[in-house]
């Protein structure tokens, strides 16, 4: 390490603002959600007795539990699609495109939408998906269908299509980053040891990019689990996930129950992250 | 099949996937931009009727969503606040972590948590905090607080990458030449990590400018631009929204361009500085 | 036409290889034949095309023109994984996610050998290279020298026809290089495998190679045994590149029997020429004379003479190296065994001399005006 170190006291001073901000803006609000979720009244009042009233309601309502499963399934679907799409693109950009300039251009084309409004991007999908939308018109033009079909807007298909376009970047980015750091000599050395490209891919490239895949999948998981805007704008509130339920409950003033759903969402996300870290041996992360 | 043919086909296939996805990703935004220029009679989808600036005039006039200009002003102000604060706090945080103080690992994960926490929950929690502690919700207080929770971790990660990239011997050299730690930081360290600082500022700006999930419960009556857009989608979709969407997307792209230019200038200058010092 | 029989004489043959990277010509019409069991060193400055040549042999680069034959088989159209060779990379290219054992067995695994055989041969190889105790370690826990052994073991376990080595000891500590060089030479002699060793270090090339191939600007300047390269540099580039040569520029004044009289800024000197290829009088030429052949105590045979002043003395073990200045300001190097000759002091004026047959006239570079 560098000899340039300030004394600990200086470090604490420098770290303090950021730490306080995160505590005030993230930790305290989260604790408040947990606290409110145990308020055993319908009113929002500090005098509320503590109890499991709203948790019991959640436990006794299968509709809400199905919502948890729906959310997890939708997230799993997105993880599967973005994994394959994202890996293919990363492999193409890093391994097949020649010239640093072209690689950077492709990477920029991929990430620039991340810096624009997700909400506007969602709205942009609507003219595509409607009964008279671009997709239906194209399909009719190609002669694949005779009548417009309604499977796109206000449907899970439409939501999934839009989500794929938003979240694939998160699966690709970390893989691109990790793959670019693999020295080309490793793949060449494997070729010189009589490994065909298929075997180089599975024995060298894939194992070495697992940290990137893992980080990417974690980002997709966290974002899709908490996504409610896509379902709200494209699904027309017909299809909801846990995030939409929190929003609906908040708007109808059921704050404690909204908190219970929020806690359930949080716990599901914790469980998912823990599972992801378990599936892939975390010690291998140190390989690169 | 010959091995070269097979490799070429593989490349073609992967290229097809990549370019296909890029088209898939960009097409809706392009179509939205095109449709925003439709005639007064035109609807929210194809076929497009004629070309006009009607919907731009419509949304510029006060009639649309009770005037979008104050929300846009708030969003821009908030973005600037987040941009400056993110760059500053992230720089301090990363400089602090270089000495691996007791609890620095914990500190790192505390900040990283901001990326992982779902936006709607952060907003919900902030709404509770404000309500219980009697703080009024406002875009420049509560919304600012939760936006920073989202932008700060990005700034920190970018700056960590920037700090890892330069040669730490340059700092040692400055110290042995008798420079104080304060001077060394501002004369040597800061110019070298400036590209990272600019990157952190860019993330601070664009992520806050477009942020919506975190703002939803935390903002109160003086709403930001994404919030009024979301409300309007719920109510009614009309080409005015496309005009607005196209306008804010262009603003985002201009900001990216501006930061990219800044980044380019700074990096070029710091490179020539390093060339002189080494 | 090349008949297969003819090709079998050589373990490796390159015929007219040309490789471009966009506008840059990395290898230009290069031909090379290597007999089985030879130790060949490709020597040259960076960017001369030696590594590209090695990668063309491996199939990692595809040449625009020319043929590559390995072990009597034409391989231009084969991918690397079907060619009969092994390669050691400069950074060793060990797979970071595999244990040493897995790493060494990788080649056999790719050749679809039975598990039991892989096990046995990996054990043998680990023992041969004295790395048995590292079998379960990952590369990031190995030292530079250990990595080098693992890389060599991994390359040789497949019993390749030839081994390509790209600066294989360039990344090792200086103190390790000597012993590793001796070991590699020993391995090569024992196994009788053809080694193609790329280096920019002439000491490496001269102490290891049976044949040294000096490259510059995408072409071979000279190829031959180390002694020939050192004592009879064919071109001016080789004379400059190899340490210990004094190079003179001049014009041919006259051709007299077996030698040319060459006019230089420092005087007229006699240099032997091949009468059949003698340059025309008036032609610009260069020649060189080795620093260890010059003498400061010339006798009658030393017809070429120079007067010079000693500027600096270096002690190199058994040798003293003098840096001397001629009257026209040019510098000349002189090397003498400490046991022979008397010491020259700084500032002292001496007469240097050499015999006609000691000078080496250079072939002008291709394309240069005669």
Image (spheres, coloured by chain):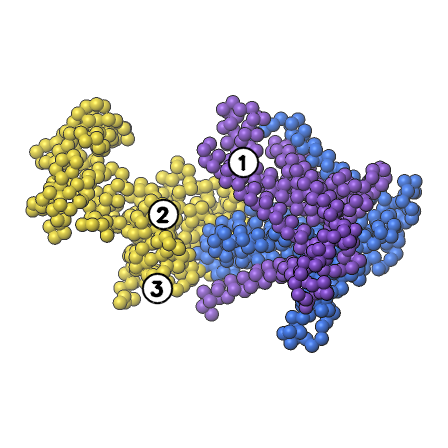
Looking at the image, tell me whether mark 2 or mark 3 is earlier in sequence order. 2
Q: In which chain is the residue bearing label 3? A: C
Q: Which residue is mark 3?
A: C74
Q: At x 51% / y 27%, what residue is drawn?
A: B174
Q: Nearer the viewer, mark 3 or mark 1?
A: 1
Q: Nearer the viewer, mark 1 or mark 2?
A: 1
Q: At x 21% / y 48%, what residue is drawn?
A: C364
Between the C-alphas of marks 3 and 1, the distance is: 53 Å
C174 vs C119: above or below: above
Between the C-alphas of marks 1 and 2, the distance is: 31 Å
Chain drawn purple in the picture: B
Q: Are marks 1 and 2 on the same chain?
A: no
Q: Nearer the viewer, mark 2 or mark 3?
A: 2
Q: Which residue is mark 1?
A: B192
Chain drawn blue in the picture: A
Rate crowding at label 1 as few (under 14), some (14 to 19) or many (20 or more) other CA atoms within 10 Å.
many
Residue C160 position by quadrant = bottom left
In-image side of C95 versus B98 (left or right): left
Q: Position of residue A85 (x, y in %)?
A: 61, 60
Mark 1 residue element: helix
Q: Position of residue C198 (x, y in %)?
A: 35, 48
Q: Which residue is mark 2?
A: C47
* Nearer to us in this view, C330 or C118: C330
Mark 3 residue element: strand
C136 vs A233: above or below: above
In-image side of A82 versus C9 (left or right): right
Q: In which chain is the residue bearing label 2? A: C
Placement of the N terminus of chain C among the 4 image quadrants = bottom left
Q: In which chain is the residue bearing label 1? A: B
């Amino acid at each position: 390490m560098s000899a340039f170190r300030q004394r600990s006291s200086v470090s604490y001073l420098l770290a303090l603002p950021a730490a306080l901000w995160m505590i005030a803006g993230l930790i305290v609000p989260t604790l408040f959600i947990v606290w409110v979720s145990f308020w055993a009244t319908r009113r929002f009042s500090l005098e509320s007795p503590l109890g499991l009233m709203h948790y019991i309601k959640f436990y006794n309502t299968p509709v809400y539990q199905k919502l948890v499963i729906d959310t997890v399934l939708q997230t799993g679907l997105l993880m599967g699609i973005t994994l394959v799409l994202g890996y293919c693109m990363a492999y193409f950009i890093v391994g097949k495109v020649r010239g640093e300039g072209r690689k950077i251009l492709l990477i920029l084309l991929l990430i620039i939408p991340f810096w624009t409004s997700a909400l506007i991007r969602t709205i942009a999908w609507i003219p595509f998906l409607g009964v008279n939308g671009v997709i239906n018109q194209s399909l009719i033009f190609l002669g694949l269908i005779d009548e417009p079909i309604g499977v796109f807007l206000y449907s899970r298909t439409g939501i999934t299509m839009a989500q794929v376009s938003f979240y694939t970047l998160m699966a690709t980015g970390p893989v691109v980053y990790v793959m670019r750091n693999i020295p080309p000599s490793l793949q060449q050395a494997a070729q010189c040891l009589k490994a065909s490209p298929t075997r180089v891919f599975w024995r060298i490239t894939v194992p070495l990019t697992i940290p990137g895949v893992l980080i990417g999948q974690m980002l997709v998981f966290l974002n899709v689990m908490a996504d409610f805007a896509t379902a709200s704008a494209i699904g027309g509130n017909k299809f909801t996930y846990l995030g939409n339920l929190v929003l609906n409950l908040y708007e109808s003033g059921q704050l404690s129950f909204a908190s219970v759903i929020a806690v359930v969402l949080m716990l599901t996300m914790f469980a998912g992250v823990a599972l992801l870290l378990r599936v892939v041996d975390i010690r291998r992360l140190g390989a690169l | 099949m010959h091995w070269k043919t097979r490799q070429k086909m593989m490349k073609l296939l992967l290229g097809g996937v990549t370019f296909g996805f890029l088209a898939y990703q960009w097409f809706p935004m392009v179509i939205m931009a095109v449709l925003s220029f439709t005639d007064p009679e035109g609807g929210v989808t194809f076929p497009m009727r004629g070309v006009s600036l009607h919907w731009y005039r419509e949304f510029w006039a006060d009639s649309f969503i009770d005037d979008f200009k104050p929300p846009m002003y708030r969003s821009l102000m908030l973005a600037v606040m987040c941009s400056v604060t993110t760059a500053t706090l992230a720089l301090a945080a990363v400089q602090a972590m270089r000495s691996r103080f007791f609890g620095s690992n914990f500190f790192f994960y505390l900040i990283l948590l901001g990326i992982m926490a779902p936006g709607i929950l952060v907003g919900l929690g902030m709404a509770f905090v404000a309500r219980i502690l009697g703080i009024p919700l406002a875009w420049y207080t509560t919304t600012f607080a939760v936006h920073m929770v989202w932008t700060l971790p990005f700034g920190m990660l970018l700056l960590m990458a920037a700090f890892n990239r330069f040669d730490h011997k340059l700092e040692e050299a400055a110290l042995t030449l008798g420079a104080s730690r304060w001077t060394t930081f501002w004369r040597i360290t800061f110019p070298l990590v400036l590209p990272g600082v600019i990157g952190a500022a860019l993330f601070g700006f664009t992520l806050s400018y477009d942020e919506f999930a975190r703002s939803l419960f935390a903002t109160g009556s003086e709403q930001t631009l994404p919030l009024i857009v979301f409300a309007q989608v719920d109510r009614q979709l009309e080409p005015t929204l496309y005009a607005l969407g196209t306008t804010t997307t262009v603003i985002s792209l201009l900001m990216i361009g501006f930061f990219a230019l800044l980044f380019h200038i700074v990096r070029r200058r710091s490179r020539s500085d390093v060339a002189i010092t080494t | 036409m090349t008949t297969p029989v003819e090709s079998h004489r050589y373990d490796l043959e390159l015929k007219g290889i040309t490789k471009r990277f966009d506008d840059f010509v990395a290898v230009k019409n290069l031909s090379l034949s290597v007999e089985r069991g030879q130790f060949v060193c490709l020597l040259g400055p960076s960017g001369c095309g030696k590594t590209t040549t090695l990668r063309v042999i491996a199939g990692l680069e595809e040449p625009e023109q020319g043929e590559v034959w390995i072990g009597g088989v034409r391989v231009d159209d084969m991918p690397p994984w079907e060619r009969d060779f092994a390669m050691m990379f400069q950074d060793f290219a060990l797979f970071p996610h595999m244990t040493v054992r897995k790493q060494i067995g990788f080649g056999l695994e790719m050749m679809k050998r039975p598990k039991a055989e892989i096990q046995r041969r990996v054990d043998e190889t680990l023992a041969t290279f004295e790395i048995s105790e590292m079998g379960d370690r990952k590369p990031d826990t190995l030292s530079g020298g250990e990595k080098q052994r693992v890389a060599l073991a991994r390359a040789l376990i497949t019993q390749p026809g030839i081994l390509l080595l790209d600066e294989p000891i360039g990344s090792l500590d200086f103190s390790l290089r000597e012993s590793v060089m001796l070991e590699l030479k020993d391995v090569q002699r024992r196994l009788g495998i053809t080694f193609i060793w790329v280096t920019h270090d002439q000491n490496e090339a001269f102490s290891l190679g049976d044949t040294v191939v000096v490259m510059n600007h995408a072409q071979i300047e000279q190829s031959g045994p180390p002694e020939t390269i050192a004592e009879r540099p064919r071109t001016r580039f080789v004379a400059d590149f190899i340490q210990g040569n004094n190079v003179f520029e001049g014009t041919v004044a006259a051709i007299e029997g077996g030698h040319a009289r060459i006019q230089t800024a420092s005087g007229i000197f006699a240099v032997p020429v091949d009468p059949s290829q003698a340059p025309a009088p008036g032609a610009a030429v260069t020649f060189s004379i080795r620093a260890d052949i010059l003498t400061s105590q010339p006798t009658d045979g030393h017809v070429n003479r120079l007067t010079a002043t000693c500027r600096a003395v270096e002690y190199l073990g058994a040798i003293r190296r003098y840096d001397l200045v001629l009257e026209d300001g040019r510098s000349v190097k002189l090397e003498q065994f400490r046991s022979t000759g008397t010491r020259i002091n700084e500032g002292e004026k001496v007469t240097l001399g050499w015999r006609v047959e000691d000078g080496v006239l250079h072939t002008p570079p291709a394309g240069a005006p005669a």
